[in-house]
Image: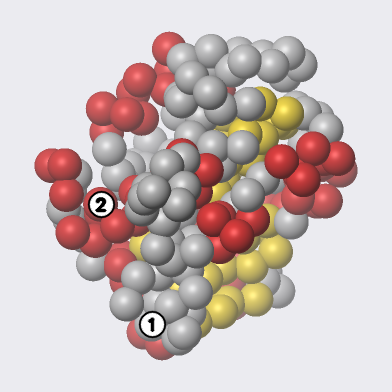
Amino acid sequence: MIHFSNLEFILKHGLHTKNSPLCDPEYINIGDVQLIEQRHSFHVRINPPGGDLGDYIPFYFGGHSPMLLNIKTGYRGIQKRPQDELVYIVCRISEIVSQCPEWCFTDGHAKNSITEFYNDTKDLIHIDWNTVKAQIWRNDEDDMDRMRKKQAEFLVKNYVPMSCIAGIIVKTAERETYVKAILVRLNLPIKVHIDSNNKYFYP
């Protein structure tokens, strides 16, 4: 999930971490800036691939993330933005595994002390897929761990090449037009999907 202004650079150069000399110098961060900074000092609890969370490109497994809700509402002091300013970069796990040598994933929020890290795709069975796909993810007496599990991440170390990108999800037809113009300019046959049924964005 990125700000739309970052898209063209990514489609030209791939996704890079903040510390990479090849990262976008004009990259617009979304979400909790303090949390983003803290990730650079939080150690990944599996080796390989090791390192800190800041060494990784993070992907959610689904939409309707708690962070997206915070961005939509401005909750917790996070900069409020219209959802139309955000787009999803979609990658297939199979493509990442075949093209990216170092990666891992979690079964919940990466910084939570009970979250487990994995580096074998056989362990994707440990993801709570019903929670990942849910639009409502509040903790309640039926599941006091729902919010943590909703924020499971797939983490790719250092760099994700543009060739891993399988699609782009947008909220409106106007944003679709903007994205398709970039794809035509760059001669890229990447599919664009409008989330008209709010499967990824909030209503």
Real-space CA distance between mark 2 and mark 1, rounded to the nearest whole angstrom: 20 Å
- Image quarter in which the C terminus is found: bottom left
| Cβ atoms under marks 2 and 1 closer than 8 Å | no
Residue 45 % position (x, y): 62, 15
Residue 181 % position (x, y): 49, 78
Give whichever of 131, 2 is nearer the camera: 131
Q: Mark 2 belongs to which amino acid? A: Asn
Residue appearing at x 13%, y 42% in the figure: 77
Residue 180 % position (x, y): 53, 78
Say which element carries label 2: helix
- Does 81 appear above or below 126? below
Residue 65 % position (x, y): 42, 54
Give whichever of 154, 2 is nearer the camera: 154
- Does 123 appear above or below 95? above
Q: Is residue 185 visible?
A: no
The answer to which image quadrant residue 44 occupies is top right
Return the mark for residue 70: 2
Disc 2 crowd, CA 10 A, few/some/many (<14, 14-19, 20+) = some
Give whichever of 166, 138 is nearer the camera: 138
Give whichever of 16, 143 is nearer the camera: 143
Q: Is residue 78 left or right of residue 144?
A: left
Q: Is residue 123 visible?
A: yes
Say which element carries label 1: loop
Q: Choose the circle earlier in sequence order: 2 or 1.
A: 2
Q: Mark 1 belongs to which amino acid? A: Thr
The residue carrying mark 1 is 172
Disc 1 crowd, CA 10 A, few/some/many (<14, 14-19, 20+) = some
